[in-house]
Image (cartoon, rainbow, N blue to C red):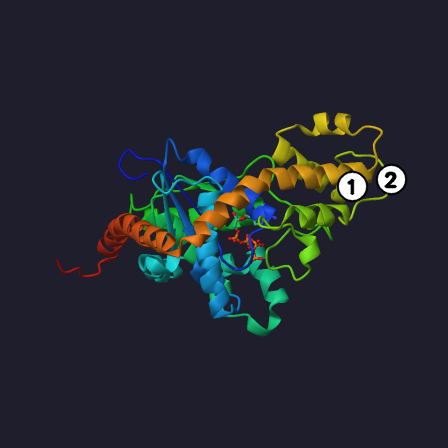
Amino acid sequence: MFGEQKISYSGVQPSGNLTIGNYLGAIKNFSIYSEQYKTFYCVVDQHAITVRQVPAELRRRTYETLALYMACGLDPEKNTLYVQSMVPEHTELAWILNCFTMFVELSRMTQFKDKSTKHADNVNAGLFTYPVLMASDILLYQTDVVPVGIDQKQHVELCRDVAERFNQLYPDTFTVPEPVIAKSGMKIMSLADPTKKMSKSDENTNAVVYILDDRDTIIRKFKRAVTDSGAEIRYAADKPGVSNLISIYSCFTGKTVEEIEREFEGKGYGDFKLAVGEVTADALAPVQEKYRMLLADKAALEAQMKKGAEEASWYARRTLSKVKKKLGFVQLR
Ligand code: AQP
């Protein structure tokens, strides 16, 4: 809360082409807060370098992610849209918060365990302290709510612990944020292995539906999606493949699981997969069209980056200055 204003904050890494998991679990829910909250949505490029990135690709994806935010309905007049590395207060506060985060807390983070297995040749300190930078992102803006997919819940909970610890030592410094997890779409699973989260960095591109995939590709990928034994279209723990497809269908149509099970009663997996592909392609078509228009105007995107960074900096500087004062750092006027 900044004064009387409630704050919503979230971010997406430009670490790959964005997936329908990023869309349904996070971006689609960002605009819910645009009317009543002051909202900050960031392209978190500094998080992305915890894993090796090709510089030209990181740069390109930073523009693309910003354009996608806007194409997904985030109006830059109503939301502060910006790039993390353009607001240096993020890393400055992160250092301070590093000194208030326990090694053992970071050791428990499942994303660190997963990513250090996946990138065994590059288990760097940034990968380990990633949640501290994320806490800094959130706390700089005195955030009330953080709309994220369920995989990020543990990081937001750590952020709450760090904020509470800091507030105990230095009262009234940070707003303690709440994670907000959408009921549907909280965890979209891989189409090749429905026990695994759909991730933009998955090497198997058939396992992932990207927001920018064309209609034929989307339909083909869903046709090839791994389903389960049996033929019933039913949401159940022992049917992770079909359940994942039901979740996706539900997110894009607004239908409940029961309505979907009824709609496809007596029908086979083939019909169902085609229907999921079609509703996904229909829902993404207007986003893709708007995205192409936005991406074509690089100067306008850069102007937005500048404006967004200036807006964000104003808030970030106020919190950082408060923190420094509380800690006893000398600040010259
Ligand atoms: N499969 C998913 N289902 C629901 N939500 C998801 N999110 C990511 N994947 C799914 C949500 O998207 C937001 C942005 O994620 P991120 O870019 O910060 O990184 P991530 O969570 O690590 O996502 P990826 O796609 O798996 O990226 P890579 O492959 O680079 O690690 C978050 O709110 C996240 O919950």
Q: Where is residue 201 in the image (x, y as percent from the top left)?
A: 60, 59
**For mark 2, does the 10 Å Cα neighbourhood hold few (<14), some (14 to 19), or many (20 or more) residues?**
few
Which mark, by number, is residue 239?
1
- Identify the residue under disc 2: 230
Residue 162 showing in the rendered view: no
Residue 203 showing in the rendered view: yes
Inspect the image, locate mark 2, and give the three-letter code of the amino acid beneath it. Answer: Gly
Which mark, by number, is residue 270?
none
Residue nearest the observer in this picture, 22 or 155: 22
Inspect the image, locate mark 1, and give the three-letter code of the amino acid beneath it. Answer: Lys
Q: Where is residue 209 in the image (x, y as percent from the top left)?
A: 64, 50
Residue nearest the observer in this picture, 245 or 134: 245
Q: Where is residue 262 in the image (x, y as percent from the top left)?
A: 76, 25
Residue at image x 62%, y 50%?
A: 213
Q: Do the residues labelled 1 and 2 touch (CB within 8 Å)?
A: yes
Residue at disc 1, secondary structure: loop
Residue at disc 2, secondary structure: loop
Can you say which quadrant of the picture contains the N terminus? top left
